[in-house]
Image: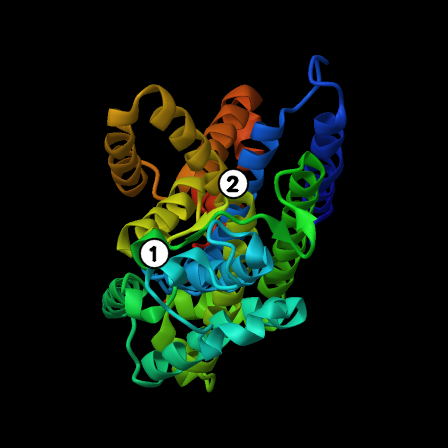
Amino acid sequence: MPRREALAVGLAAFVLVVVLPLCNALPADGPFSVSNFTLNLFGKFLAYAILALGLDLLWGYAGVLSLGHGVFFGLGAYAMGMHLMLEIGAKSVYQSALPDFMVWNQVTALPLFWQPFRSGAFTLAAIVLVPALFGLVFGYLAFRSRIRGVYFSIITQALALSVWLVFNRNEMNLGGTNGLADFKTIFGFPLNQPVTQRGLYVVTAVTLVVAYLVCRWITLTRAGKVLVAIRDSETRVLFSGYSPAAYKLFVFVVSAILAGLAGALYAPQVGIVTPAKIGVLPSIEMVVWVAAGGRGTLYGSVIGAVGVNWIQSWLTTSYPDLWLLFLGGLFMGAVLFFPDGVVGALGRLIARARRFLAGPRGRASLEPPHLSRATHGGSRPPRSDQ
């Protein structure tokens, strides 16, 4: 990792993990105080950013566009939500050991697949393994069949719709359309206490930093270079002796794991998990985050996830009728005017400003070497297809 990037990551990590929680612990009337609501809201945004990192690794580097990542987000969220529902115990509204929605549906015994989620260790393992195994099976079947491009996007969208329909059924014993809600404790700590919410935020921020470092490490390895080559020309990679399907399956599983972790961190901070986070619309919104921030950069996906959701929070509060129009306009703008996202657009503006301020001589020195040679009569660079 370049030194400048390492310093930027370290500074961002210090602000997110240390500064913001300390500001939240200050007296509420202080000038640098961060309210519990703001910290909780920002924790939700950081959970989204973890998912966006995995999606950027899959789409921005490998060129595989998934329109069904809400499924993996939902699997992690439901795994955590099931444990939180069982932690309530007899303190529920009906004072039953069963979750309230099971009492409504006249379920007399806890379903067998709910039993292991009484264990916190099993829940933590399921948060990682369930999305990973689901992504492994789906990805293996899709990539082995050489499904790619828009066809892969369509089947992932169909997957999101199918899973959304399944989770809406009351027969699944997962709360139906109401989902899982009214969580009270997490691993024995009361969720209605500011200290617990602050701890959840810190865990989310640390997970985001670790996820960024892992994704950046992958992009710097040989596997990361192969992923970029697959994005640019999968056929050439195949003829070079590599197996594109294996690399795409690897990055797809990593992306699914990050989405599951994001869902698990999202559930206790928001207090509810419903099928609405699994369907087609939220999966498309996740793609908009990455596209708006700048795919293929990692940090652009983080900026996009936090920025778009921050604007959404403001618009849905102040101008609720404009949110969907803004989201559609943002997606259209990202496709037509800044396809490399906000990060890429800012980079081009900064480069132009540097060339303008540098003057004629400075502009020549700032040009790439091959452009400078071509301008001064030197040999032209080889074509990329030679």
Q: Is residue 108 visible?
A: yes
| Disc 2, SS | helix
Q: 366 or 274: nearer the eye?
A: 274
Q: 384 or 44: nearer the eye?
A: 44
Measuring from the top left, give residue 89's x and y in whole percent: 57, 59
Give left or right: position of 20 versus 330: right
Q: Which residue is mark 2?
A: 45
Quadrant of the frame with the C terminus: bottom left
Q: 47 or 101: nearer the eye?
A: 101
Measuring from the top left, give residue 223's x and y in whole percent: 56, 72
Rate crowding at label 2 as few (under 14), some (14 to 19) or many (20 or more) other CA atoms within 10 Å.
Answer: many
* Res 275 label: 1
Q: Is 346 above or below relative to 218?
A: above
Badge 2 amino acid: Phe
* Res 46 label: none
Q: Residue shown at 34%/66% (left/top)?
A: 106
